[in-house]
Amino acid sequence: MGMLVLPRPAPSRHASGVTAARRVLAFDQDEEFLSTASRLLTGAGFQFRAVRDPVQVQGQVADFKPDVILLDRAVPGTAFAQVSQLLRDSPIPRVFVLADHGERELIRAVQGGATEVMLRPFNEQHAARLAPLLDELARRPKDEKLSREEQVARNFMDVARRNQLRGSLVVNRGTPFEGRVVLKEGALVRASYGPLSGMDAVREILQLEDGQYELDSSLNLPVPKVAQSATSLDGQSLSLGVGDTADIRPRLLAVDDEPHLLALVSRVMVASGFSVETAVDGADAVDKSLKMPFDLIVADLSMPRMDGWEMLKTLKADTRTAEVPVIFLSAHDDYREALRAARAGAHDYLAKTGRSDQVVGAALRTITPRLEVIFHLLVKEPVEVRTQVIGLQWFLRAAQRLACTGVLSLEDDWGHYQVAVTGGQPVGAQAVVQGRRVTGIAAFVRTMVAKGAQGAFTFGPPPEGTGDISLSMEDLIAKGCEILNANEAKAAEKKLASAIELDLDPELFDLFCRIAPARKVAFAQAICEKRMPLADVAGSLMITQEQAADWFRELLRREVLVPPASLRGRPDPSRPWTPNELHPQIVKRRERKRAMVEKVRAQLGEDPWVSIASEIATVLGLAPGRELTFPDLVKFAATHGFEWPDVHVVVELLTAFGVLQRRFVLAGGDFSSPVPAAEVAQRLGASLHDAAGREAWNQWAGGIRVVWRSTPGALEMYPT
Amino acid sequence: MSPQAPPPSPPPPSDRLTDYFKYLAGISPAAQQVWAATGEAEFGAAVGEAVDYALKTIHAEASLAGRQPGLSRRLVHLLSAAAVPCGTEVGQDGQVHVTVRHPAELAFTVRRVLGGR
């Protein structure tokens, strides 16, 4: 993994271009940082103002009118994200102060709107860089109209130039849609991503939300390794010596609704060493993929029943089929469609030119990394594993087919993962994620979630203490997929169920689009986006009024459509009427909310308790699913300047009123199974009577953690 | 039981259940009895003890500070600090009712009238 090395410029004796009018606003909760920045920047002729509370940022920006805003990325909790979001559309340049030297932090900062990045600790060199930075920004054309994506790309290139970055920024390494930005002394040498090159490629690469960014020192493009056929690579051929080589031949599924094209693709792929199955459309392909894991799918885009896009979406949404790479064949040669394919997660996009060698070439490029792994496993050599490229399920099935014995060790930004196999069957798994160690199936599930993890498989007997899985490889993978699919479905359902106070939540709308027929989606768009009255919508979609009313009730029930925040107070008479404002369910919800807030506030009394409750609601509301523990509450109190016992009182009060839930969970074990409060009470009771009970309690309760989390839907009831 | 205001408790050193109850016992000696109560009589007695302790704390605070602000609210805060779930309601007669629920949500409650405002 490369590290971003930002050179430290020589201290400047004179802060060039500084005028008394230049103002710096710094947001941080670290007093040492603020006092250092204040001293250095004031000394360099800037006017300086510090702000510590996220809620005051916008007011201070309006009042102080800074020329630049310094944001410390290391602010604990969600305060940084909160401020960053508040300033997202602000035209004032922002400089992010980072504690981490990694490339991911750099990219995240630029994606978050940073004009420049600086590394902690803040010193006089940083202060000296601000004046030239402001001079440079002042020279930017005033009337330019750049999209947000273009601004991010330009900011990245400017950061690269100022910091003289050198090397390659790579995303999705090892896949046909690999993106690469090559920089030499801060200047762009070349950039490519799918069909794009130059600044277009830079712009697209920086928009990847789940991209795995790496920065290395290479300036030259690596020579891509491509298999000669589906069974030979670097002069080696797949041959087990015993049994049938077909067992390990890559399995390809060809999908097309035109029989003669399907036959053609099948024939050339079989001739190239693939074991080929066929499907007549997307739905057929999904069915077959669920029955048998394929190494590759080559599919047409335009098909009846289920087209290529829908097929890809369905495959990616199911953990069982998400890993299989898909190559699209299209009748069009359109770079926009190719880009759409890259964004949707396709491995490659080819125009149907009639030349079969292009399809074979793309298929061989795609399976090359897997073939490399197979050859290593056959000769029992340690092998590098990148789960994003070859897939965890695929690797484990390969290890099963070749009866390997060893340990797969992976890591990513969040933790370390190990899966031990003996004779191709799993015997144990462990994971340490953010300091918490889990074993068994829970660890395996966490390994499956780590889609960008990388590491190696080493041969040899697994170490002692890893024998905690008794399922077969297929059963283990099936179990892991079942758990992840169930979690995904639960999360999707929860999002649908807990949405309130929004006109149209894009995420919920996306979810609704997945489950609703096209006409219902058009109906929702007409009501919420176009503000059409119900009667007009019914007319334009040619449905009856009753049907329109039914569909409308469904949208309300699913809470995809709800009144906007602006209507929480006084309705705006100039706003066109939409029927959802008057729906009794919405009115009732609003009344319930008001009553709830009044009740909790009546119990809390005056400040600091009301402020503490608002801060807690903000912290938990910004990070749904986040849990607070005792140490978190102590830290929270210290960070926000509250007394610890006051914070605890508010947490217990919010718990009593159902806004928060107190949960008892097994420490280091299965986090998903909380211990019922009644059991806690019962065991505690036993401990109060005799020494044996006390000892048993200490032993048991020492392995239980106490956490608070927000009750789904309740925090929205508590305005901040 | 001391009528003096208790010294401020240090926060629990970890998120373990043992530390949680040790902390609660430091806030109110009856807190664990409230949690462990399995019948109405036990629960009533334990809550009574927790309320008495809280009232003594309030009196001690009042004698120290020379004033007695928001009695019912302070009582709720002190019980909450001991993880005893409770809330106040003002009745028609001006009396304040403090409702205490069992922390493990066992199905019984105790109501006790505290006095006029």
Image (tube, grey):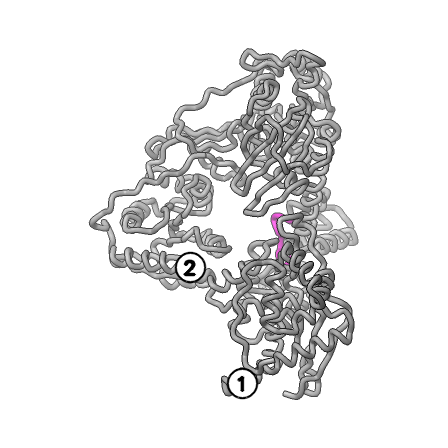
- Circle 1: is it few (<14), some (14-19), or many (20+) Cα within 10 Å? some
Q: Numbered disc 2: what chain?
A: A
Residue A312 can be seen in this image: yes
The residue sitting at 50% across, 69% down in the picture is: A643
Q: Nearer the viewer, mark 1 or mark 2?
A: 1
Say which element carries label 2.
Answer: loop
Instruction: Tell me: residue A537, above or below residue A234.
Output: below
Indicate left or right for A382 with A470 as reference. left
Q: Quadrant of the C terminus of chain A?
A: bottom right
Quarter where residue A380 is shown: top right
Instruction: Give the vertical position of A364 relative to A557 (above or below).
Output: above
**Residue visible at 51% across and 19% down?**
A225
Gap in angstroms between the C-alphas marked 1 and 2:
36 Å
Disc 1: which residue: B62
Subunit under mark 1 = B
- In the image, the segment drawn in magenta is A500-508
Residue A563 visible in image: no
Query: Looking at the picture, how far across and down is residue A449, in whole percent?
Result: 61, 40
Q: Position of residue A562 (x, y in %)?
A: 65, 57
Q: What amino acid is labelled 2 in the image?
A: Gln
Type of residue at label 1?
Ala
Indicate yes or no whether the magenta region holds residue A501. Answer: yes
Can residue A219 be found in the magenta stretch?
no
Same subunit, tags 1 and 2: no
Front residue of A31/A645: it is: A645
Tag 2 residue: A29
